[in-house]
Amino acid sequence: MADDVCPKCGSALGEITETSNGKKLRRCSAGVWDSRTKKTIGCDFVKWLPVEPQTLEEVCPKCGAPLLLVVTRFGKKMKKCSASGWDKVAKKATGCDYVEWINGTSKPLEETCPKCGAALVLYTTAAGKQMKKCSTSGWDRVAKKATGCDYIQWLKSSSSKLSPGEEFLPPFPEDA
Ligand SMILES: [Zn+2]
Ligand SMILES: [Zn+2]
Ligand SMILES: [Zn+2]
């Protein structure tokens, strides 16, 4: 396969190696990376491999196609519809446009909400801020407003200031 041959020198490409941030690459077998001098000895061709999106067991709420888990080059995660594509000529998205940014994690707490008595969850934002919030709260993407109980208690360790209402902003793609 032509894919396995270095375009610079014609030698075979080496094994797939993975970098610390999850990217995959293949070096030319005629080159050796010298970690002491931080230079390549011999052929310096490196072939970066695309990070394969992972197919999830979830399906797209819009069209029913399987969702893919995609990691952006900034390390942010999103779920996107496998029926979506990119038209390189027209420079616009094609197919289904469903995208769900994975912005934080929540885990159930054994405390109850002082407002409504439902369980609280500990929510950690993508930026590492933590808050306790009511498990009945949600975000209505259509109406663009918060739903359910609005009880929120930011944990004191977060020193950064929040503008009012920031906690209810929907996930926002910073690098889309
Ligand atoms: Zn080479
Ligand atoms: Zn879809
Ligand atoms: Zn509540």
Image (cartoon, helix red, strand yellow):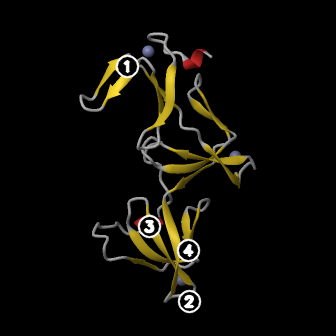
Q: Which element is circle 2 on?
A: loop
Q: Residues within 10 Å of mark 1 (few under 14, many from 20)?
A: some
The residue type indicated by label 1 comes to Asp
Q: Nearer the viewer, mark 1 or mark 3?
A: 1
Is disc 2's CB within 8 Å of ligand 3? yes
* Extreme residue toward the right, this view: 64
Q: Which element is circle 4 on?
A: loop
Residue at the image position 43 percent from the left and 47 percent from the top: 174
Is disc 4's CB within 8 Å of ligand 3? yes
Q: Which residue is mark 3?
A: 124
- Counting residues from the N terminus, which is met first, the one under dot 1 or under dot 3? 1
Is 173 in front, or is 30?
30
Residue at the image position 51 percent from the left and 50 percent from the top: 77
- Counting residues from the N terminus, which is met first, the one under dot 2 or under dot 3? 2
State the separation of the CA atoms marked 2 and 4: 12 Å
Q: Nearer the viewer, mark 1 or mark 4?
A: 1
Q: Which residue is mark 4?
A: 137
The reply to whether discs 4 and 3 touch (Cβ–Cβ < 8 Å) is: no
Q: Which element is circle 1 on?
A: loop
Residue 67, above or below 148: above
The reply to whether discs 1 and 3 touch (Cβ–Cβ < 8 Å) is: no
Q: Quadrant of ligand 3?
A: bottom right
Q: Which residue is mark 1?
A: 44
Residue at the image position 49 percent from the left and 89 percent from the top: 114
The residue type indicated by label 3 comes to Thr
State the separation of the CA atoms marked 4 and 3: 15 Å
Q: Which residue is mark 2?
A: 117
